[in-house]
Image (cartoon, grey):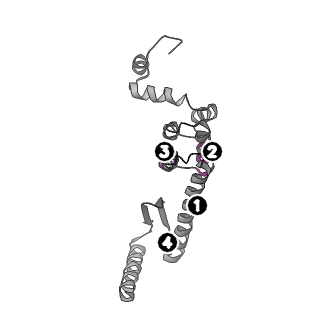
Amino acid sequence: MQDFDLNQEQIAKKAGKDRASIANFLRLLKLPAEIVKDLRGQKISFGHGKALLSLDDKKDQVTVRDVILKDALSVRATEEVVSKIKSQQLEGTSGEVANNINENQQVKQRLKTISRDLTRRWSTKVEIKGSDQKGTILFYYQNKQQLEQILEKIQKESQWQEKRI
């Protein structure tokens, strides 16, 4: 922009992008240098960068970026962490970023453990996606016979629970 004396609209036309995309790219350049480097090296995505932008504190941005890299957080998981941090800051309890991230990691680990236990119990891969608030449980099957076995087990479990009540 400075070298060629162009505005965002002119850059957007030359780059074949819309002006909002150019504005977002320029906003990403305001992140700390190590985060910009990770964006350029594609270690984190544009979506991760946008989520980090909503944090005002540069230290918080770098802390969350470290967790993104260490735990391969999705953009959605990053947005959840950022949202929790922001809500704590609004409540006047800022400075609890590490606790918030630790809590998020504990939930993630607990869901992974439950997924592993369900995989053993049901003799098929079971995956849990989401958080402690909401999510999805996926049962994988290889063929119709395995699907029928899973459905039969679910039906038996349901009937057993009804008898207990």
Q: For this rendering, which residue is in front, 79 or 94?
A: 94
**Furthest-front residue in this view:** 92
Q: Amino acid at mark 2?
A: Asp
Disc 2 on helix, strand or loop? helix
Q: Amino acid at mark 1?
A: Gln
Whether residue 25 appears in magenta in the rendering, the answer is: no
- Label 4: how many residues lie within 10 Å, few (<14), some (14-19) or many (20+)? some
Residue occupying the point 54% across, 73% down: 117
Which residue, given by chain and number where applicable, does mark 2 sit on? Answer: 66
Q: For this rendering, which residue is in front, 124 or 163?
A: 163
Q: Which mark is residue 90?
A: 3
Cα distance, mark 1 to mark 3?
A: 23 Å
Residue 10 falls in image quadrant: top left
- Tell me which segment is drawn in magenta: 65-78
Q: Are marks 2 and 1 in contact (CB under 8 Å)?
A: no
Q: Are marks 4 and 2 in contact (CB under 8 Å)?
A: no
Which residue, given by chain and number where applicable, does mark 1 sit on? Answer: 106
Counting residues from the start of the chain, the first of labels 4 and 2 encountered is 2
Estimate the x, y position of residue 121 in percent, counting from the top left. Answer: 51, 77
The answer to whether 60 is drawn above or below residue 73 in the figure is: above
Residue 112 falls in image quadrant: bottom right
